[in-house]
Image: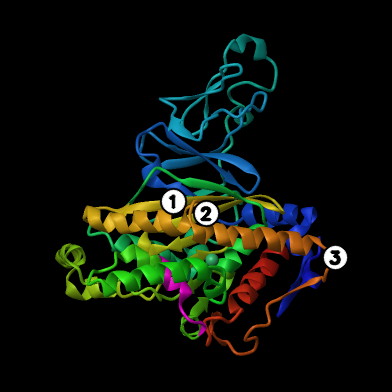
């Protein structure tokens, strides 16, 4: 399938969001080849712990092995095809056992026992045949505890794939005095009634917050002002919301950096370094762990948001991670996770929890307003209104050096242009 004619440097054809054949090609050429996030190592702590995850269209299992390593297997019994594990997560004990005919497998997928083996003698389904074992993902690797798998045997290594986006995980982990994070094992799962690309475009879209999130932002800033007028100090979480209603000029001053493979960064704008007692106690812990210079470096990286294209949005200063699992052209599962900084005080964790619930959860007015836009974009693009989607804003104005596109205006649609450059590269393979 050729898609070149659907993507121009400053606009794309609407069918890239709506067409089933294009979606199928995306699953095959992008999601089932690239390194896809499976989960955090702390989701599978003990041998036998598993977590079920979808890579492209493939049901997979991340499983902790007796030797401490992690394997990723296709969740499919080699006998009659039944998914060996039916739950989202759990512990399999010492073996994976199919519920249909009790074929059993070691935790790395190798067949352990075929029940009533006598009936298979002189057939091709004997234990020495590799097709009697559960198939493994071609490649598994991790970066600072974040586990990825690729279903393609060939291709860039995980560090090559992540490139500049590695900073998402460095920024998150370096904020812990122990250099590690631990998953909070509750995840909001939302089915977005829209194409996965809307979410990716929206995350670094600095033009939309003061429109889409105006009502929430203004209400929060009114409360902030009132609390201040009454002589109080508004809690930090009001600022999470009021910051959305910043002026266009402020948003325009927040730079985006756009990297090869579609990754990107929206620089910091929230000013998340208050000087209250909790923050000072936390900074003292970091200074003891790393020294003053490193502590300053770790806390002053200018990052609000890192995107790992095509499916991950990481807000490292607040330990948030959202992962997309596309289902259909107009259906996308998003998993919304957050993490605890190991060794950091409870008060610092609370900030992450507040952001998780107030901004990223499906119950908030921020996420809900975005979801409505994406659904309506999906419906609009399914119509015969017009064929093209515009990414012209500040086209020709961005600065490019060594493959990195830096916007000179925060509201530049450089983000979308860069994502589609990566998309075209994947789809041409
Ligand atoms: Fe938004």
Q: Nearer the viewer, residue 149 or 316?
A: 316
- Residue 390 % position (x, y): 71, 77
Q: Nearer the viewer, residue 372 or 17?
A: 372
Residue 187 on the magenta segment: no
- Residue 319 % position (x, y): 37, 58
Q: Nearer the viewer, residue 383 or 99?
A: 383
The Cα atoms of the two marked residues, 2 and 1, are separated by 8 Å
The residue beneath circle 1 is 337
The residue beneath circle 2 is 323
Quadrant of residue 302 within the rendered picture: bottom left
The residue beneath circle 3 is 384
Q: Is residue 209 above or below residue 152?
A: below
The Cα atoms of the two marked residues, 1 and 3, are separated by 37 Å
Q: Residue at x 20, y 68 (%)?
A: 276
Q: Earlier along the polypeptide chain: callout 2 or callout 1?
A: 2
Q: Residues within 10 Å of mark 2 (few under 14, many from 20)?
A: many
Residue 247 on the magenta segment: yes
- Residue 75 % position (x, y): 58, 34
Q: Nearer the viewer, mark 3 or mark 2?
A: 3
């Amino acid at each position: 399938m050729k898609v070149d004619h659907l993507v121009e440097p400053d606009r794309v054809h609407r069918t890239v969001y709506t067409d089933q054949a294009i979606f199928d090609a995306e699953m095959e050429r992008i999601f089932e080849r690239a390194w896809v996030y499976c989960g955090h190592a702390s989701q599978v702590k003990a041998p036998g712990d598993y977590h079920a995850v979808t890579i492209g269209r493939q049901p997979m299992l991340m499983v902790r092995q007796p030797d401490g390593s992690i394997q990723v297997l296709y969740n499919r019994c080699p006998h009659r095809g039944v998914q060996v594990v039916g739950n989202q997560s759990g512990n399999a004990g010492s073996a994976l056992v199919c519920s249909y005919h009790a074929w059993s497998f070691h935790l790395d997928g190798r067949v352990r026992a075929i029940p009533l083996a006598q009936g298979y003698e002189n057939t091709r389904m004997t234990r020495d045949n590799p097709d009697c074992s559960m198939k493994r993902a071609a490649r598994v690797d991790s970066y600072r505890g974040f586990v990825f798998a690729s279903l393609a045997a060939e291709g860039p290594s995980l560090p090559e794939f992540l490139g500049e986006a590695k900073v998402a995980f460095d920024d998150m982990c370096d904020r812990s005095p122990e250099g590690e994070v631990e998953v909070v094992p509750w995840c909001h799962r939302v089915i977005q009634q829209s194409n996965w690309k809307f979410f990716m475009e929206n995350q670094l879209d600095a033009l939309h917050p003061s429109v889409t999130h105006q009502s929430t932002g203004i209400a929060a800033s009114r409360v902030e002002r009132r609390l201040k007028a009454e002589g109080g100090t508004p809690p930090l979480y009001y600022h999470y919301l009021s910051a959305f209603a910043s002026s266009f000029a402020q948003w325009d001053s927040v730079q985006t950096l756009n990297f090869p493979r579609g990754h990107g960064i929206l620089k910091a704008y929230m000013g998340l370094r208050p000087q209250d007692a909790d923050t000072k106690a936390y900074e003292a812990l970091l200074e003891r762990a790393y020294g003053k210079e490193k502590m300053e470096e770790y806390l002053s990286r200018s990052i609000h948001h890192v995107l790992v294209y095509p499916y991950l949005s990481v807000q490292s200063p607040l330990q948030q991670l959202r992962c997309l699992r596309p289902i259909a052209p107009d259906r996308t599962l998003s998993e919304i996770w957050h993490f605890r900084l190991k060794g950091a005080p409870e008060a610092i964790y609370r900030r992450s929890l507040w952001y998780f619930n107030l901004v990223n959860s499906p119950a908030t007015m921020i996420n809900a307003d975005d979801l409505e836009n994406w659904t309506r974009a999906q419906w609009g693009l399914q119509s015969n209104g017009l064929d093209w989607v515009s990414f012209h804003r500040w086209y020709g104005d961005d600065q490019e050096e060594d493959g990195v596109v830096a916007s000179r205006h925060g509201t530049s649609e450089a983000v979308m242009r860069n994502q589609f450059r990566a998309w075209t590269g994947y789809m041409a393979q």
